[in-house]
Amino acid sequence: MSNLRNIIVGQSGGPTSVINSSLAGVYKTAKERGFHKVYGMLHGVQGFLDEKYVDLSTQIHTDMDIELLKRTPSAFLGSCRYKLPEIHEDPDIYEKIFHILDKLEIEAFIYIGGNDSMDTIKKLSDYAIIKGHPQKFLGVPKTIDNDLALTDHTPGFGSAAKYIAASTKEVIRDALGLSYNKENITILEIMGRNAGWLTGATALAKTEECSGPDLIYLPELTFDMDKFLKKVQKLIKQKPNLVIAVSEGIRLADNRYVCELSGGPDYVDAFGHKQLQGTAAYLATFLGAEIGCKTRSIEFSTLQRSASHMASRTDIDEAFMVGGAAVKAADEGDTGKMVVIDRVSDDPYMSTAGIYDVHRIANNEKLVPREWVNKEGDFVTEDFIDYVKPLIQGDYAPFMVNGLPQHLVLDLDKK
Amino acid sequence: MSNLRNIIVGQSGGPTSVINSSLAGVYKTAKERGFHKVYGMLHGVQGFLDEKYVDLSTQIHTDMDIELLKRTPSAFLGSCRYKLPEIHEDPDIYEKIFHILDKLEIEAFIYIGGNDSMDTIKKLSDYAIIKGHPQKFLGVPKTIDNDLALTDHTPGFGSAAKYIAASTKEVIRDALGLSYNKENITILEIMGRNAGWLTGATALAKTEECSGPDLIYLPELTFDMDKFLKKVQKLIKQKPNLVIAVSEGIRLADNRYVCELSGGPDYVDAFGHKQLQGTAAYLATFLGAEIGCKTRSIEFSTLQRSASHMASRTDIDEAFMVGGAAVKAADEGDTGKMVVIDRVSDDPYMSTAGIYDVHRIANNEKLVPREWVNKEGDFVTEDFIDYVKPLIQGDYAPFMVNGLPQHLVLDLDKK
């Protein structure tokens, strides 16, 4: 190894509103700690294997660029959904990665992502130790789903929760404004295949001037169509206007996804995950037919993870913090670790960055605990709300240009 | 008639982000011009016929309340979809309305709404003149669809266009961030049954750092599935990541809505309008099968008309202005008129409130002119963009309370 201290950072998995704030944190801390070059891999490890990367100093020139990056949703560097094979399955890929790392004189490799990305960090740090490579490998958590173990919560979750709660408030106002002596049911479909953190966040729409959603169904609990119908039939007699939040991933007792009942086309992604869409539409059609009232389904869709104009300041700041903390940890000799967020205090809310061994983290999903859902299984408890509330606080005003939020966008022709 | 100068205001039709800014304008101007009581009818003429109304001074106490009302989406007073019968069809309804108006000592009746509401103003002012009733009837335009004739544009349109353009930018970032060497098509479904103003507004996402949508299909032009498929097949060879905007109301040459092709359930509203939903989902499934790539459909749904957190300052200010102008016109003796927005200048953008005879307006739909769509029929022209751009400028920062935008909400127990 030369004495050149370079660092490379990548982004992986589903985008969030604040994944670029972590990138900004990595870049700023790396520069401050005297790293020479800060490379960004394009489209994560997948692009890296094709030797696609960029010197980030060609993209980020000023503190204003850093601020703009913090307000830019989705992966600035491009993301990927790529699972590294086990070391014994394909050692050539590992050789290739370390060959490129040596060539670029990389001291630290920072990967911003979810469960699958932490698995990448684990494998690469294991390989480096086994083979005696000097590089450090650090993970920075990122997922709107909040399903990573050992961290109090994940960067990206708070902003998605804030967008969902704000949009739920607006949808409720819309539904109430229209309805007069007429029954009306709105079903909201929220992301989160196995973990109901985001679906539960619709409960935050319950404020002093908003009744919030009436029912909330998380994917952690078995969904019972009969029980659901009976509950709605009972409720609509007391309140003609219902708003119901469901996770895209709710499943019947026989394990079928509710969205599969509509008989729509299946799509399976690179990790073998089924593409889920149409749960709310199916339930709206079902209730419309059974109850005979007007129903509407609304999917917040990818806006949940990309609406940076409604991002949480707490979330953006924490995303920045964990990015910087990963660089600091690598610089101090850590490897095979993920930065986590430790909640120091609830009121006033305080958090710090901690470090965990990535072997203890990877591939464990953190689900909503049963005791944070009510007995009936159709709403979250005050404990759930108290946990999420601090994470949606505060704002970063978007930089508005010609009436629209401005973003920082990769330009490979820039010098 | 007594000497008491009371005024009543109602809201009708589909909600918008700024329909309450017009209400605020009515209230503030009425108070300033010395009207005694300002009543609000609950759920428009329909609630009024049930004698449901509220003294607005019990709801709005301070200038802060006015500001909060300007930032509250959907009809504060509740809306309705009610079409007044022709005078000869049901004179009793007219007698009842004027009986209540006399009882409340109303001098002016202000109705905030779309085409159907202007029809109500026309009928009531005709009836008053025929029967010698002294009340004045004034219409205030409101619709996200921008399909009212004679006004340069409608309050509500600019904010919906701004939300759509901002969300389109975010969706495009999201789609680009994920895609690596893989074809990917996102289809956005935009409101506007017959008029493509909002679908065309996705073109505003094309900015210095965003390529904008690739194709735009308005409901004014016949949609050709074969031509569409061929265009997409050609385009995706040059650009693996496509974002396509379609109106919910696009129709085939045989007049069927594209959303009807999926064979989903029909819903017909009080005006006999078919509920349209599923156009993008149908096209996404169609393209997925024909091209064999990943597709996603996104409906912006009711958030287009209720996302007041992304409202346009120009729009909120103009909505306020036309509300106030209606009160001024009534106070000066006008009746059977609608307030319109006249564009005085493009650059710098300036507008004023004008007055038009409602007989010249009602039930005419203003569509996107053919010359504002390109020859191919799959994008809007620079003239279209120049027309919309001034309408999305500027913001009113939401009043954030506990991390979420606060709204002013009707409370009938308040004094």
Image (cartoon, coloured by chain):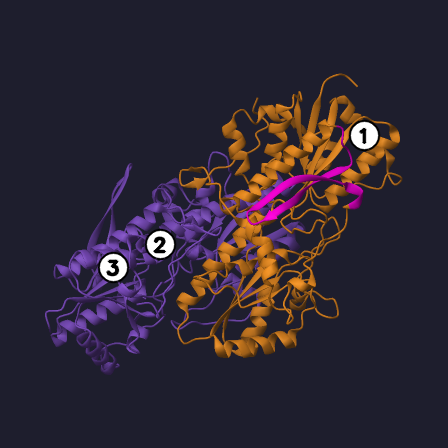
Chain colours: A orange, B purple
Q: Earlier in the sequence, mark 3 or mark 2?
A: 3
Q: Position of residue B201 (x, y in %)?
A: 42, 47
Q: Position of residue A143 (x, y in %)?
A: 65, 47
A100 in relation to B197, above or below: above
Q: Is residue A2 left or right of residue B302?
A: right
Q: Which mark is residue A128?
A: none
Residue at the disc numbered 3 = B27
Q: CA distance from mark 3 to mark 2?
A: 13 Å
- Callout 1 secondary element: helix
Chain under disc 2: B
Residue at the disc numbered 2 = B68
Q: Residue at x 80, y 35 (%)?
A: A124
Give the label, 3 or 1, closer to the camera. 3
Label 1 neighbour load within 10 Å: few <14, some 14-19, many 20+: some
Say if labels 3 and 2 share a chain: yes
Q: Position of residue A262 (x, y in %)?
A: 64, 67
Question: Which amino acid does the dot numbered 2 rest on?
Answer: Leu
Residue at the disc numbered 1 = A96
> Which secondary structure class fits the magenta region best?
strand
Q: Is residue B380 left or right of residue B296?
A: left
Q: Position of residue A246 (x, y in %)?
A: 60, 63
Q: CA distance from mark 3 to mark 1?
A: 71 Å
Q: Is residue A270 left or right of residue B128?
A: right
Chain part drawn in magenta: A333-360
Taking the magenta stretch, the answer to whether it contains residue A334 is: yes
Chain under disc 3: B
